[in-house]
């Protein structure tokens, strides 16, 4: 829907009722009206997103969002011409406001605040600096985070965030809101980890082995299940995905890889089954993988987050390890320490058939994806 065309078709004094969703700007408001958004987003790469050139305008339940701020003009989300004085009700802003007294002065706060990696069952205090041109309030939508003082004064403010004790493998994700005449938001990320990326207390099988580069390991022939743990250490919140692809008989000689989800029966591969050491445990039911699939490749990819980590620069002690499906003891261990910190993906390992037996080939080769 073209929001400007919708506006042009209403009469002066009417309401433009927008359904929830996203609308691409810009929008020039040239007559008295009510823009009722129902929490929709009006966005654009270049500002101003909304320009008010008339008196008698009300903006209600709308988010105005700049997606690029390469220069001062492009970063304007709302431009109000002199003397227009619109009514503002529950309007969120990502970008600058021009034409409303005090709101257009300098705001300085991070778009994203990364709490990093937190120790389980411990209280934390994190300090966040905010520069505000006016008095306003700050609120959190994260139940585990309390703000010591919700009042923000004009000028420099060091805001203390109180984080309650949380269990291992808890992901913290939410928002802080700066509430003045408008609402501005700060994205919050964090991870509660026991930091046991390579734990010395883990139980090992009698035939445990630490693999070296180029060494293969034959997966157990006494069970159809192969459990592979993946883990690392980081002091930052890392958003990631694990990609699994395979090579079939049909294209094996061509070395062509493809998605193998169609070849796997339901429940064959379980991702993100976390335990107290690993970030993820992958379960391969080898007996259920169709004969057409000869080789499986597993890749770890770092997903970008706004203001966060999007490569391996904050990761160390990356490893894979075998886990016995019967005793849960560790069967093998392979440490990966040759990856580039500037890459965002790494081939962890391949599982392949050799003389009807399944073997694992640790790789640890990083690349950009």
Image (cartoon, rainbow, N blue to C red):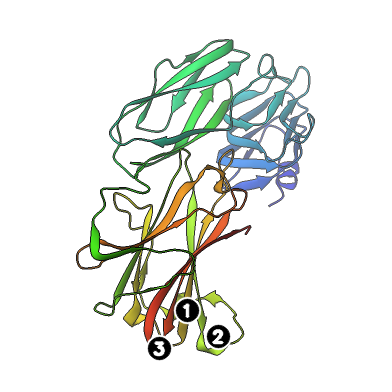
Up the image or down, 164 lies above or below 22; here it is above
Q: Is residue 32 above or below residue 319?
A: above
Looking at the image, tell me whether mark 2 or mark 1 is earlier in sequence order: 2
Do labels 1 and 3 touch, CB within 8 Å?
no
User: Which quarter of the figure is the C terminus placed in?
Assistant: bottom right
x 60%, y 44%: residue? 18
Query: Looking at the image, which is closer to me, 41 or 188?
Result: 188
Whether label 2 touches label 1, CB < 8 Å: yes
Percent from the top left, x then y, of residue 54? 76, 26
Answer whether residue 112 is visible to the viewer in this image: yes
> Tag on residue 137?
none
Q: What is the secondary structure assignment of the residue under circle 1?
A: strand
Instruction: Give the label on residue 295, or none.
Output: 1
Which x, y percent locates residue 48?
A: 76, 34
In the rendered structure, find residue 252 and report the number of the disc placed on it: 2
Badge 2 crowding class, 10 Å Cα cut-off, few under 14, some 14 to 19, many 20 or more, is some
Q: In the figure, residue 26 lies in which quadrant? A: top right
Q: Which residue is mark 3?
A: 355
Q: Position of residue 213 (x, y in %)?
A: 48, 64
Look at 54% across and 89% down and name the residue there: 250
In the image, 70 versus 236, the foreground residue is 236
């Amino acid at each position: 829907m073209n929001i400007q065309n919708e506006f042009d078709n209403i009469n002066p004094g009417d309401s433009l009722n927008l359904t929830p969703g996203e609308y691409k700007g810009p929008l020039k408001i040239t007559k008295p009206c009510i823009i009722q958004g129902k929490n929709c987003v009006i966005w654009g790469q270049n500002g101003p997103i909304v320009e008010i050139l008339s008196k008698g305008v009300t903006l209600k339940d709308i988010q105005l969002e700049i997606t690029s701020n390469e220069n001062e003009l492009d970063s304007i989300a709302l431009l109000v011409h002199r003397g227009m004085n619109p009514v503002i009700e529950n309007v969120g802003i990502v970008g600058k406001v021009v034409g409303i007294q005090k709101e257009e002065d300098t705001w300085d706060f991070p778009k994203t605040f990364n709490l990093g990696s937190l120790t389980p069952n411990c209280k934390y205090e994190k300090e966040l600096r905010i520069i505000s041109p006016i008095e306003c309030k700050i609120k959190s939508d994260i139940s585990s985070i309390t703000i010591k003082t919700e009042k923000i004064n004009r000028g420099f403010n060091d805001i203390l965030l109180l984080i309650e004790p949380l269990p291992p493998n808890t992901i913290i994700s939410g928002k802080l809101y700066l509430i003045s005449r408008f609402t501005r938001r700060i994205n919050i990320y964090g991870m509660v980890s026991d930091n046991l990326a390579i734990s010395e207390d883990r139980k090992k099988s009698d035939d445990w082995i630490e693999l070296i580069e180029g060494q293969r390991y034959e997966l157990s022939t006494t069970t159809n299940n192969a459990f592979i743990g993946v883990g690392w250490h980081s002091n930052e919140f890392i958003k990631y995905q694990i990609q699994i692809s395979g090579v079939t008989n049909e294209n094996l000689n061509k070395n062509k890889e493809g998605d193998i989800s169609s070849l796997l029966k339901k429940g064959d591969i379980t991702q993100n089954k976390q335990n107290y050491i690993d970030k993820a445990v992958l379960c391969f039911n080898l007996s259920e993988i169709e004969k057409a699939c000869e080789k499986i490749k597993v890749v770890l990819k770092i997903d970008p987050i706004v203001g966060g980590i999007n490569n391996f620069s904050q990761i160390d002690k990356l490893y894979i390890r075998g886990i016995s499906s019967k005793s849960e003891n560790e069967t093998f261990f392979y440490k990966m320490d040759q990856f580039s910190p500037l890459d965002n993906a790494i081939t962890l390992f391949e599982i392949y058939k050799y003389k009807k037996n399944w073997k694992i080939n640790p790789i640890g080769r990083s690349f950009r994806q």
